[in-house]
Amino acid sequence: MSEFPRGAVALVSGASRGIGNHVAAELLRQGWSVSLGMRQPILPDWAAGHEDRVQLAAYEAGDPAAEQQWVDAALARFGRIDALVANAGIMIPKTVIEAEEDDIEAMMSVNLKAPRRLAKAAWEALCATGRGRVIILASLSGKRVKSAGAGSYSLSKFAAVALAHAIRQAGFEQGVRATAVCPGFVATDMGTALSERPAELMTQPDDLARIIAMLLTLPNSASVAEFAINCQLEEFF
C-alpha cells in the first residue's frame, strides 16, 4: 500500500452522518487532514482534539455555487487538496412512472451534478499533486435496477458511475484516479429505512470507510475504476 504525503487533505461531502461521517473519521485516524462538507457544520465527537486537521464547511449539494466556495475555503486553510469523497446523496423511492420531474431533477442535482462540480472546482489542485483521488459514492443501484421503487434512484446512480469513469479518463495522464464505490445496503439511517434486513446483516459503514481509505492510498499503477460491495448474494454483485 502506498502512503500519501504528510498533510494530505481530503474533502468529504455529506460528512454529518452515515457513510461520510465514518469515512472522514477513518481518514483522520490514518493521518489525513479532512474538510467536512456539512449542511450544518458541527464538530463530530471523533474530531475533538484534532481541530488542527479538521475543517468544517457549510455545504449544500443543491447549491450550484457551493462546491467552488468549499474548495476555495479548503485551499485557503490547507493549501492543497489530494482527494475528494463525493458522498452526499438523496434517494426518492419512486418508480420511473410515479416520479415527478422535480424528483428526478433533485436526485440528479445532488447525486450527479454536485460531485461533477466538486471535481471541476478542485481539478487544478488534484492535478497538481500528481496523484489526485476522486471517490464517487455510487451504489449497486448504479449497476442494476433491482426493484421498481429503486428505478428513479438508479437513473442518478448509473450516471454517477459514468461520472467516475469520465473523471478517470479526463485526469489519468495528470495522475488523477477516480473510483465508483458501489455498495448495496449499508447500516445507516438511509439503509435501514429502505430495507427490512436487520442492520447487523448489512454492510457496516466502518468497513466501507476502511475500503475507501484503502482505495485512496493505492498508487497510480493500481487504478480501480469500480468497487462493488454487497451484504447479500446476488447474481453478479
Image (spheres, rainbow, N blue to C red):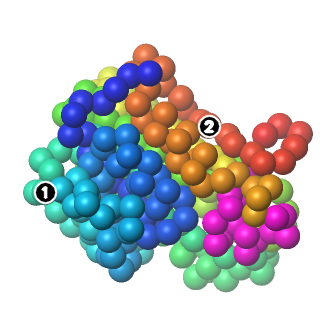
**At numbered mark 2, what does the secondary structure look like: helix, strand or loop?**
strand
In this picture, residue 143 sits left or right of residue 14: right
Coordinates of residue 32 in the picture (x, y in percent): 30, 44
Q: Residue 77, which numbered label?
A: 1
**Crowding near pointer 2: few (<14 within 10 Å), some, many (20+)?**
some
Q: Residue 39: image x %, image y %?
A: 38, 77
Q: Which residues are magenta?
A: 184-198
Question: Which one is in front, 3 or 194?
Answer: 3
Numbered circle sitting on residue 227: 2
The N terminus appears in which quarter of the rendering? top left
Whether residue 202 can be seen here: yes
Q: Residue 165: x percent and y percent?
A: 51, 38
Residue farthest toward the front in the current orientation of the protein: 49
Mark nearer the viewer, 1 or 2:
1
At label 1, the amino acid type is Arg
Residue at x-position 55% and y-position 74%: 105
Compared across the picture, whether 98 is left or right of 214 comes to right
Of 119 and 211, the residue lying toward us: 211
Q: Residues within 10 Å of mark 1 (few under 14, many from 20)?
A: some
The quadrant holding residue 12 is bottom left
- The residue under label 2 is which amino acid type? Phe
**Residue drawn at (18%, 56%), measured in percent from left and top?**
52
Q: Residue at x 54, y 59 (%)?
A: 19
C-alpha span from label 1 to label 2? 31 Å
- 208 in the magenta segment: no
Q: Main secondary structure of the magenta part?
A: loop
